[in-house]
Image (cartoon, rainbow, N blue to C red):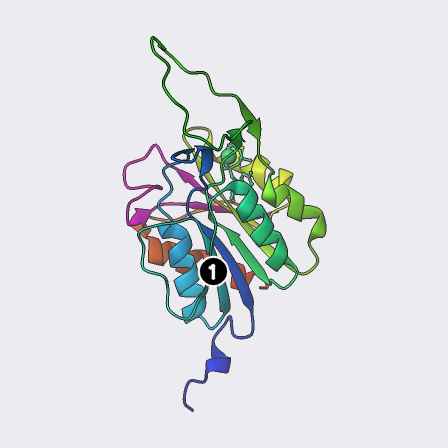
Amino acid sequence: HLLQATDLPLHGKRVLVTAGGTREMLDPVRYISNRSSGKMGYAVARVARELGAKVTLISTPTALTKPAGVTYTEVTSAADLAKAVKADFEETDLLVMAAAVSDFKPTHAVDQKIKKQPGQTGLTLELAETEDILKTLAPLKTHQFVVGFAAETQHLIENAEKKLAAKKLDMLVANDVSKPGVGFNGDTNQVTLLTPNSTPMTTNLLSKTEIAQTILKAAIERGV
Ligand code: CTP
Ligand code: CA
């Protein structure tokens, strides 16, 4: 018979994807952020849509083309992102937290541009922690399958195992961003998928689209 939309593996599923690096404003013209390009999250959103899901993408501003057929919400700070994710969480079947969330924000954001004083030779910034979104969501989980990401530069598996447990995740996608072609900005990635009670699985160096397909296939196999 003809292939029906209802045959797609994520048909009827609501998938929430976060992407990009959050921005913490220091003053109206400056912010602290990170090297996330948003490409990995965008690829997950696009592939989830192709697999039949109803997809919401919550992203920081990026230069990327918005995936077709996906509901798009733009955020800037970690606090904005937390608010948007929490608002959608209950009605989500699969959450993929690909966003690189700032761990700290300026303690005092000021509403006027910080001016360099005559003779000033340095500047010390005071930062305070942001909310850990995945930790907040962990006790609110009912049916949701939650996937976290971890970019590491050393002790990949050890650090990733700790995050999988601490954030009560169903899957953690870990990558060693110190390796060439892995992680930020590029079009390729190599990841290790960790799930509770099974051996970590490492992919080859693949396109971010292929990585997205691998992540979603693994989530579907585990019951999304
Ligand atoms: N994360 C989050 N809220 C934060 C920080 C991170 O929800 N405030 C999420 C990220 O989106 C990612 C996962 O937690 O899916 C792991 O992020 P990571 O930065 O690797 O972990 P941290 O717990 O912040 O640990 P560290 O940065 O110290 O390695
Ligand atoms: Ca972090």
Residue at image point 49% right, 56% down: 17
Q: Position of residue 42 (x, y in %)?
A: 39, 56
202 or 89: which is nearer to us? 89
114 or 73: which is nearer to us? 114
Residue at image point 58% right, 42% down: 164
Tally the numbered discs: 1
**Amino acid under label 1?**
Leu
Give above or below for 220 relative to 188.
Answer: below
**Which SS class for mark 1?**
helix
Q: Position of residue 11 (x, y in %)?
A: 52, 74
Q: Position of residue 124 (x, y in %)?
A: 45, 16
* Horizontal side of residue 67 vs 173, given as left or right: left
Segment tinted magenta in the rendering? 174-197
Task: Please check the rendered image and state whether residue 176 is part of the magenta-colored stretch, yes or no.
Answer: yes
Give above or below for 8 relative to 193.
Answer: below
Q: Residue furthest bottom?
A: 1
11 or 194: which is nearer to us? 11
Which of the image's four quarters has the C terminus?
bottom right
Kindly indicate the quadrant of the structure image that contains residue 43: bottom left
Task: Please check the rendered image and state whether residue 52 is part of the magenta-colored stretch, yes or no.
Answer: no
Residue at image point 36% right, 10% down: 120
Residue under label 1, please give it. Answer: 216
